[in-house]
Amino acid sequence: MAKSNIAIELINVDKHFGAVHANDKVNLSVQSGTIHGIVGENGAGKSTLMSILYGFYQADSGQIKVFDKDFRATSSRQSIEAGIGMVHQHFMLVDNFTVLENVILGSEGGAFITKSLANARIELTRLAKEYGLEVELDIAVEELSVGMQQRVEILKGLYKGAKVLILDEPTGVLTPQESDELFRIFEALKNQGVTIILITHKLREIMNITDHVSVMRAGKMVAHRETSKTNPEELAELMIGRKVLLNIKKSKAKSGKALLTAKNLKIHNEQGLKRVSGVSFEARSGEILGIAGVTGNGQGSLLKALTGILPLSQGSIEIMGETISPKHPFNPKQLRELGVAHVPEDRQKMGMIAEFSASETALLGYHNDKEINQGVWLKRSSVKANCESLMEAFDVRPNDPNLMSSNFSGGNQQKLILAREFERDPEVLIIGQPTRGVDIGAIEFIRKRIIEMRDAGKAIILISVELEEIMSLSDRIIVMCDGEITGMVDAKDANEATLGMMMANALQPQNEQQGVEL
Amino acid sequence: MSDFFLTAIMTLDASVRVCVPLIFAAMAGLFAERSGIVDIGLEGKLLMSAFVAASAASVFGSPWLGLIAGMFASVVLAMIHGFASITYKGNQIVSGVAINILASGLTMILTLAWFKRGGITPTLQGDERFLSITLPGVDIIDHIPILGVVYRELISGHNILVYLAFAIVPVVWWVVYRTRFGLRLRAVGENPKAVDTAGLSVEGLRYRALLIGGILCGIGGAYLSTAYNAQFTKEMTAGGGFIALAALIFGKWHPYKVLAACFLFAFLQALAIRLQGVIIPGIGEIPVQLIDAAPYILTIILLAGFIGKATPPKASAQPYIKEL
């Protein structure tokens, strides 16, 4: 063959953001018509690298070739014209536009859209058939499920003539079944000659569907492998530069009495929409209760109600001998005083204040403690000492109480918040997404600490969208779908397939009896 | 009965005249806000344009030159707003308020500097201003009952800018919902990132939206001083820019609904003038101050509770900063 088979070639691509060296002389070559995985921890520079390829950022130096042609993009327009499409982690869709309008945006092909829309309709129907990407064209995107929105993003790329499709963490928001469906689409695309670059930190996906894999660590490309000639352990080691214990060992739970009993909860969210209906469960001491589900199925509202942020519309929660009911609500402060600790799902929005120093973040919620609050003024020395001891206990780096909270890495921010909540010796811990956006090293650390709390006899409720996390930490698992509990299993009996079916509420009725015993 | 009918027609006719600057300003605001830029500075642009248009019309003796000068002045202010809030990603409210203050002060100073009068420009004579147009066929239709009066009093007899105002609304609708520019405009106000990653310029689109807004506001201001009135007077916009902003929210950023809202607010103002000195049975004479305040009070009531949820474009008031 005269023409080389390389779709994308990056040579010594370098990119700084201020003092951060996001991409350090990165080399990569992607063969045409293959699925190429790029793995690395959060902050390893994967997304930056792909954003350079997509023209969203410009490289400081280095060379890029697309289908053997020199390529330098100053905006995404050139990348699109060169045949590169990208599906971002957070979808780039206009929510109140129809699917059709979203697809033509930027590639209308004429000043008046009536004709553009008609042409696009024909083309999209063809693409949908060819790749098995059926989606309703005249529905507003905001009314579609995330899985469907992702299809729209893929269609957008194909409609614009993408021959190389970059997908950034595409399965983060999908159920296992939706992910399988996505991988089936990948195969169809590959068979039609489309090159796919898959950015992910999930090694299982890499092993299952990619042909080649490249590993990034701290801005550098550290290894290239043929997928068939590597294994998850090797990749994990390459990613973090040392061996890790991904499956954390834990002893059998010694469950004690119920510390928190929820009965028939009904919860409306801030907008007044019913998010949780008829949910009952109990959390026992010495046990981790995992709550699984696809994002947005009521777990968030449940967590807020358990921590006093949202009121109950119906039902009751018994905690440590007190009863919370619609007529007798508790606010977050009262709950904290009862011994309920809360690690919020979104640490940026609820766990900390980005502009506050670490020492201030470290006392949020506990600012009325006697040793800190002296009437009018805070006692600065106690504030600092409090933060220093938390940083010490949870190995927060850098060890500087005066540094602004937003200047810590995601993992260190999370460790600081966990330290704040764990070190007060609470009885009940309500933990949301403890390792979201946290690097592998910190994940290991955080999970060990959660298990330590369990072994110390605390009742722990863990809400996570990462099935792997739920399965490796929990002793019992309940699954939520559309505001209801659709399944409950012992962790030792759980596997991804059944949990996935429960998450989609697709289990056969005879299996639902497990839920009845609640 | 006939008397009441004529009064009603005359009030509607006055509403039409009051409505015009509101329409221009609200359509200007529609473009800006649909692109994600909050335009508090509508009032200032109206005022500046009214002053510059009246000055130019007086100096050059032509309302058309006045109109062009007014549009130019308004566009300059719009570009200042763009420079501060798009290029330099400043706070859009602050920038808009600054433009209002600037226009208010500058018009006062310039009347003194140029015409040696505080806050007014020379009165425009004859065809130095836009004059009423009598539409063809008034004589023919006149003898038909009701329709004749409606045609003669309400539809005919306005100046060219009044017709332009009402004609521009369907054009705005068509641009926003049927053109490529409109699609991109709506997209950039909802999710600028989607626009950026589609390879389009967020800044370019927003500047174009403000440019169109500047032109429209310019026409509205020129109408006030060279068509509705025959000179510029101090603060003659009297909050019209803010009423337009309210109409924009009331009409949920949709051209036809915004037009309806503009007309409602104009009707309230016209009614207030008509009701002065009228004795209402059982209540007596309504104080002039209360009548004057009525449109504003009603605006607050309507905006507070009667329009349901008005959701502005999602990216409204947020400067676009490129990051993942």
Image: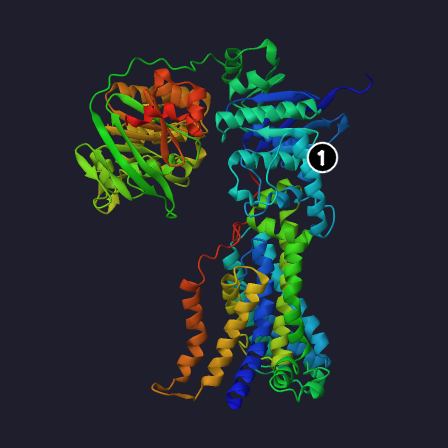
Find residue A298 and report its horizontal and vertical position in percent: 38, 37
The amino acid type of the residue labelled 1 equals: Gly
Quarter of the image containing the C terminus of chain B?
top right
In the rendered image, residue B2, in percent from the top left (x then y), is placed at 53, 89
Above or below — where is B174 with respect to A472? below
Q: Nearer the viewer, residue B42 or B170?
A: B170
Residue A254 makes an appearance in the image: yes
Q: Residue at x 31, y 25 (%)?
A: A289
Viewer-proximal residue among B136 and A94: B136
In-front residue for pair A445/A192 = A192
Which residue is situated farthest in the top direction here? A229
Name of the residue lying farthest toward the front: A510
Under circle 1, the secondary element is: loop
User: In the displayed image of the protein, which residue is found farthest to the right?
Assistant: A2
- In the figure, is residue A421 to the left or right of B262? left
Disc 1: which residue: A161
In the displayed structure, would residue A209 be above or below residue B248?
above
